[in-house]
């Protein structure tokens, strides 16, 4: 999806003459799937309007922001709600997000593009989300700490500076009116808008395009835009003040070229701040004598002292799991500078989960006491001050140092940067992370190893982030576990899976030679594994400055790596044994387990063959010859896997001794086939006389049976077995087929199992000999079925039609006719068509009419037709002229028409699965009915035998065409094609293939 979205953007975006950008909405699915949305949007707008009227100040802010959007041409009025239709469009509900702590933008209007329409689809469901393009917040903050001079800015109303193409604005409509006495107006949003799922991607992608387009004019700004922009926040640092001022001018020029404006500028450089206009600064006055602070990506920064801080006010709320999580989330610390404090809250939360405390229940007394003590200490966090700049300047010698430690409760890692300035050394805490130990008890060495993995990942992230701007002179990682140190510096294959996998992770991230041992009392990560309060963290001798020797040369550092053998837990040593195996597996074997249908298996295999032979690479579809080759391959593969002994014996001329010997198998072109005694049956095809032998318990056979089941319109087990026997012989096939039909979700949903009553004896006309098919016939109606007289977009002129079923009472052959209404004239026309195709009949049976009373609400017209004197006169006179006896079943005896009722059920069985809720034209539905008729006339009339010498099963088709089945016109496989790309003729084939 990401690749498709990116390609769509590149092909559709454009740079306007004034330098701004216009983008298209990246639709993943056709927007025609959207249903009506105006009515629900009106209801939600009226609800919003009532809420706003209750708070006049909020309503004034809301109306003012809408007016500002109109002035800035962000939105356009396209008429009143009664004038604008919702055809091929989308109306978005909207609401306000109020942020009193944001003096410049106290209100932001957010639009809900996830609101469902009448078709259950929303705009967001049909759009690509797009790849993640914004920088990682952790990496941006690392770059912000890198050099001496820092700079922050905000892209003013970033989304609203990007135009949306005219043809896509119809999908960004909303409702508004400034006065309740006025009609509701419809507006279209001309810009990228909050609430649409692809908006963050489009905004970030436009900024990247701008940076690439303007790279030659603004090289410094382009680099920063590609690396240090998080959504709409620009956050970076530079080593030179002159370069910082140049960056300010380049950023202003580059973003202005794209019609973006930068605001809320802030820096620790007085020279720069004095050059920035007051209206563009975060604080209008340039004052470096006060402690005014700002937030950089959620982290408190005091430019006057160039330090980071953390502020959490004391709250007075009950101690519940919900409130503990809420307060903990307020400590936003992506760099982990106060990670030992947040660990205390994490441990409390873990205990809450272990105790099974509900969200709003009060926990145990011990947890309440611990939480109250922790909550009271949170205001002390404001006393913590960490230098933003880690001391790196151009040309200095730097050393990246990391520490890892664990306890039974948690484990953690922290990273420091040591900078050598002349003969002195300065160490600064760069970042830290902590993890709560798993609930499952683990040994301390394993937890220490997890801490080492965390440290390796953290140091690798730092090195990767700084790789383009600064290279560390040396890198060292410390652990106070000699066991872990020995593991890291050894071969991973020596140890058990848990240890081995983590050693591999560590060695992939940083070199094993960089690891050293540090005494536990000198390890600053120890506090990360136990947690502490803000007061104690302020006084901690190791956390912020690092160990004392970190402020001295490397020759004073601990460096022992000696580990004696008795220190290593023997339980972690892997006991291995060598086994020599011979692999004969096929490289294509995994495909059969990864596909869900037989056709997908054949297509996937065909594509593999194309790649191997480098043929037909440009052909957009799979040819029938390729599918036949793939099927032949899998038949040979399955037989070689399950009948290898039989094939080997036949090739050597030896008799078969396995349980398939009674089938008299033989090899024909390398394929194992069933022998039997039908060699002289010239009317049968070679496949019918000698079907291909397949195993019963095999994934390939299951896919084959399922495909036949779908091709036969979800037919039952007997019909399925009949058609399978025309090509394949599967031992115990009935059991496998029943299991396949039982697993079919479509059949399971459509065929509830009613309790079967005791069956009455069959009447005489059912069991007496009949001279030919349809000599004695039953007739019944089914319906109504909705059809459309013609196909045209937007037309829904539906009409009722009915299905007239004629069934032979002797051989169960059926004849289906589609009739346009329930008049006697339409029935007589259908009856004439039936006689013209099937020949005359001597007896006609039908229901008497009272059996329709239970369904009178739906079939009242049919009841009136049967009971009407005109129907009796018209039908009776016509039948009398043809010498046909018409009998009607007695009232209140529906079982007397069971033969046609069951066949109507069978017909509906197929129609429900292949047509569903689709509306077809008269010709399309008639075509489907004829295909269903052919399937019904191919059902076996008797129980099938397991003997290979048995003839083909007897079906009604034998009495009609002297053949076992009634074939339909071959059609290409369309199941993989999107329905909206098919024409009406292809849609008929697509419906039947579902």
Image (spheres, rainbow, N blue to C red):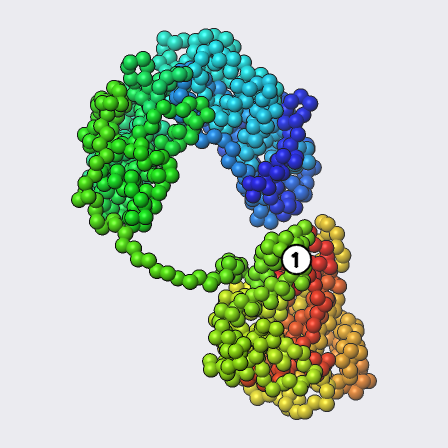
Q: Residue furthest right?
A: 881
Nearest the viewer among 394 and 142 is: 394
Q: Position of residue 721 (x, y in %)?
A: 57, 76
Q: Please determine whether, in this image, residue 437 is positioned above or below residue 53.
A: below
Could you tell me which residue is drawn at 70 percent across and 72 percent down? 967
Number of numbered callouts drawn: 1
Could you tell me residue 538's position as x and y percent? 24, 23
Task: Where is residue 460? Give x, y as percent.
Answer: 38, 33
Question: Looking at the figure, which quarter contains the N terminus?
Answer: top right
Which residue matches tag 1? 622
Which part of the image, by quadrant, shows the C terminus? bottom right
> What residue sits 56% from the left and 66% below the top?
634
Residue 890 appears in view:
no
Q: Residue 602's quadrant in the figure?
A: bottom right
Query: Is residue 573 something one can see in this rendering?
Result: yes
Crowd class of label 1 (few under 14; some 14 to 19; many from 20; radius 10 Å): some
């Amino acid at each position: 999806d990401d690749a498709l979205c990116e390609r769509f953007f590149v092909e559709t975006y454009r740079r306007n003459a004034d330098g701004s950008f216009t983008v298209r909405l990246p639709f993943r699915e056709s927007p025609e799937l959207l249903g009506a949305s105006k009515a629900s949007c009106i209801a939600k707008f009226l609800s919003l309007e009532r809420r706003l009227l209750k708070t006049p100040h909020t309503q004034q802010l809301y109306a003012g922001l809408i007016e500002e959007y109109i002035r800035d041409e962000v939105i356009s009025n396209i008429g009143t709600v009664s004038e604008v239709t919702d055809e091929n469009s989308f109306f978005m509900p909207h609401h306000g997000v109020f942020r009193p702590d944001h003096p410049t933008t106290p209100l932001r209007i957010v639009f809900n593009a996830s609101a469902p329409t009448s078709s259950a689809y929303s705009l967001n469901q049909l759009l690509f989300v797009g790849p993640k393009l914004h920088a990682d917040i952790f990496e941006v903050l690392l770059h912000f700490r890198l050099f001496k001079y820092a700079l922050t800015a905000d892209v003013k109303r970033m989304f609203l500076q990007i135009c949306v193409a005219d043809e896509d604005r119809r999908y960004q409509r909303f409702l508004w009116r400034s006065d309740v006495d006025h009609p509701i107006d419809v507006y279209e949003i001309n810009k990228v808008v909050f609430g649409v799922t692809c908006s963050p991607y489009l905004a970030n992608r436009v900024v990247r395009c701008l940076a690439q387009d303007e790279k030659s004019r603004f090289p410094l700004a382009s680099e920063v835009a590609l690396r240090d922009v998080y959504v709409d926040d620009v956050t970076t640092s530079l080593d030179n003040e002159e370069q910082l001022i140049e960056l300010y001018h380049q950023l202003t020029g580059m973003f202005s070229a794209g019609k973006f404006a930068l605001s809320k500028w802030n820096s620790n450089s007085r020279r720069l701040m004095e050059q920035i206009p007051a209206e563009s600064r975060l604080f209008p006055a340039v004052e470096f004598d006060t402690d005014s602070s700002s937030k950089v990506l959620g982290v408190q920064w005091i430019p006057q002292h160039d330090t980071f801080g953390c502020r959490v006010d004391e709250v007075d709320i009950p101690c519940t799991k919900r409130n503990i999580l809420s307060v903990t989330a307020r400590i936003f610390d992506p760099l982990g500078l106060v990670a030992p404090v947040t660990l205390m809250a994490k441990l409390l939360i873990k205990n809450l989960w272990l105790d099974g405390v509900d969200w709003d229940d009060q926990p145990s007394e011990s947890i309440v006491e611990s939480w109250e003590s922790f909550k009271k200490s949170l205001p002390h966090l404001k006393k913590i001050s960490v230098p933003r700049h880690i001391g790196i300047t151009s040309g200095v010698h730097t050393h990246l140092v990391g520490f890892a430690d664990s306890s039974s409760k948690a484990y953690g890692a922290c990273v420091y940067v040591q900078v050598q300035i002349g003969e002195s050394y300065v160490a600064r805490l760069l970042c830290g992370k902590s993890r709560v130990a798993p609930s499952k008890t683990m040994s301390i060495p394993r937890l220490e190893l997890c801490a080492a993995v965390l440290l390796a990942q953290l140091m690798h992230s730092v090195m990767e982030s700084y790789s383009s701007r600064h290279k560390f002179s040396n890198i060292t990682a410390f652990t106070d576990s000699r066991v872990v140190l020995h593991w890291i510096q050894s071969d991973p294959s020596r140890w058990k899976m848990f240890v081995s996998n983590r050693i591999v992770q560590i060695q992939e991230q940083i070199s094993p030679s960089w690891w050293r041992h540090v005494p536990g009392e000198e390890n600053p990560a120890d506090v990360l594994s136990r947690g502490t309060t803000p007061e104690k963290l302020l006084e901690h001798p190791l956390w912020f400055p690092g160990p004392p020797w970190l402020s001295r040369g490397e020759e004073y550092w601990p460096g022992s790596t000696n580990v004696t053998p008795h220190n290593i837990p023997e339980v972690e040593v892997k006991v291995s044994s060598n086994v020599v195996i011979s692999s004969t597996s096929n490289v294509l074997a995994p495909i059969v387990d990864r596909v869900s249908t037989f056709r997908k298996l054949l297509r996937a295999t065909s594509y593999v063959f194309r790649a191997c032979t480098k043929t037909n690479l440009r052909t957009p579809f799979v040819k029938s010859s390729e599918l036949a080759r793939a099927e032949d391959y899998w038949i040979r593969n399955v037989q070689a896997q399950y009948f290898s002994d039989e094939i080997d014996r036949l090739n050597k001329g030896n008799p078969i001794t396995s349980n398939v010997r009674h089938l008299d198998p033989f090899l024909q072109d390398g394929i194992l086939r069933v022998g039997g005694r039908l060699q002289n049956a010239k009317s049968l095809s070679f496949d019918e006389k000698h079907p291909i032998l397949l195993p019963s318990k095999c994934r390939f056979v299951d896919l084959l049976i399922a495909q036949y089941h779908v091709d036969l319109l979800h037919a039952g087990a007997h019909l399925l077995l009949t058609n399978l026997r025309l090509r394949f012989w599967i031992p115990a096939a009935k059991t496998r087929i029943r299991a396949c039909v039982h697993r079919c979700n479509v059949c399971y949903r459509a065929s509830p199992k009613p309790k079967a009553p005791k069956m009455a004896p069959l009447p005489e006309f059912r069991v007496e000999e009949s001279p030919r098919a349809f000599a004695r016939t039953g007739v019944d109606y089914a319906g109504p079925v909705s059809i459309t007289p013609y196909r045209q977009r937007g037309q829904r002129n539906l009409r009722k039609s009915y299905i007239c079923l004629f069934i032979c009472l002797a051989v169960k052959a059926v004849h289906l006719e589609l009739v346009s209404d329930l008049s006697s004239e339409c029935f007589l026309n259908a009856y004439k068509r039936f006689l013209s195709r099937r020949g005359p009949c001597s007896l006609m049976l039908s229901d008497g009419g009272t059996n329709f009373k239970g369904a009178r609400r739906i079939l009242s017209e049919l009841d009136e037709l049967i009971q009407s004197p005109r129907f009796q006169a018209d039908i009776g006179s016509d039948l009398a002229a043809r010498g046909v006896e018409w009998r009607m079943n007695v009232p209140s005896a529906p079982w007397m028409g069971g033969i046609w009722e069951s066949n109507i059920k069978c017909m509906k069985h197929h129609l429900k699965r292949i047509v569903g809720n689709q509306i077809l034209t008269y010709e399309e539905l008639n075509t489907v009915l004829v295909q269903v008729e052919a399937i019904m006339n191919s059902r076996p009339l008797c129980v099938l035998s397991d003997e290979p010498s048995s003839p083909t099963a007897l079906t009604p088709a034998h009495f009609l065409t002297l053949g076992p089945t009634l074939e339909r016109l071959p059609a290409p496989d369309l199941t993989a094609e999107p329905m909206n790309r098919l024409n009406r003729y292809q849609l008929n084939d697509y419906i039947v293939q579902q």
